[in-house]
Amino acid sequence: MSRFLTAAACVAIAASFTVDARAAYNPAAGKAVYDASCGMCHNTGMMSAPKIGVKADWTARMGQGLDKMVAKSIAGFNTMPAKGGNAKLTNQQVGDAVAYMVQQGK
Ligand code: HEC
């Protein structure tokens, strides 16, 4: 029973996560932002950045929800620079790029 509940909770989290991503951010638009401003670290995992397309690098991070990941990407945290070091990006562009990264990591 408890195993069933855990599985159900995971499905619920995954479902709400997908809805959030679709509602607020555009992963297709995020690709260009990613290529220009984020790939230099996230293509290679430089400075232990989570690597694009590597599912294991994203699974745990996705548990906190897309909005939180976007907020941290805008503000910066640890060695991840605010907006990837490109202050000209809008919050929406950063969100689009995060949505793209998460989509690639699924
Ligand atoms: C200078 C290197 C660098 C650049 C450029 C960079 N990142 Fe990061 N990023 C990192 C590192 C390092 C981490 C891991 C930080 C940690 O977990 O301590 C990270 C983590 C992340 C995370 C995971 C956040 C979380 O909550 O776990 C996201 C999302 C992210 N970056 C998005 C972006 C986006 C979007 C861009 C471009 C706008 C970008 N990054 C550009 C180095 C970079």
Image (tube, helix red, strand yellow):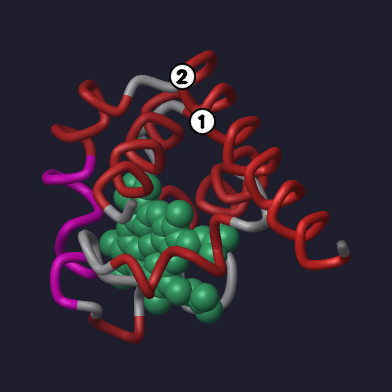
- Does residue 91 appear in this view? yes
Magenta part of the protein: which range?
34-44
Which residue in the rendered view is the most extreme toward the bottom?
A: 47
- Image height of 94 relative to 39, above or below: above
Q: Which residue: 35% across, 85% down?
A: 48
Outermost residue toward the front in this view: 1
Give the vertical position of 49 relative to 39 (above or below). below
Task: Please tell me how crowded label 2 is: few (under 14), some (14-19), or many (20+) other residues with Cα within 10 Å.
Answer: few
Within 8 Å: ligand 1 and the Cβ of disc 1? no
Image quarter for ligand 1 equals bottom left
What is the CA distance from the residue labelled 2 to the residue labelled 1? 6 Å
Q: Main secondary structure of the magenta part?
A: helix
Residue beneath the point at 31% across and 48% down = 101
Numbered badge on residue 22:
2
- The residue at which mark 1 appears reads as 18
| Relative horizontal placement of residue 7, taking residue 66 as reference (left or right) | right
- Residue type pointed to by label 1: Thr
Q: Nearer the viewer, residue 25 or 39?
A: 25
| In front of the other: 91 or 20 | 20
Pointer 2 with pointer 1, Cβ within 8 A? yes
- From the viewer's perspective, is 68 left or right of 33? right
Residue 35 placement (x, y as % from top left)? 12, 45
Residue 29, percent from left and from top = 23, 22
Residue 1's tag is none
The reply to whether the magenta stretch includes residue 35 is yes
Query: Which residue does the image show at 24% across and 81% down from the upper left?
Result: 46
Under mark 2, the amino acid is Arg
48 in relation to 106, above or below = below
- Residue 32 position, x and y percent, is 14, 32
The local secondary structure at tag 2 comes to helix
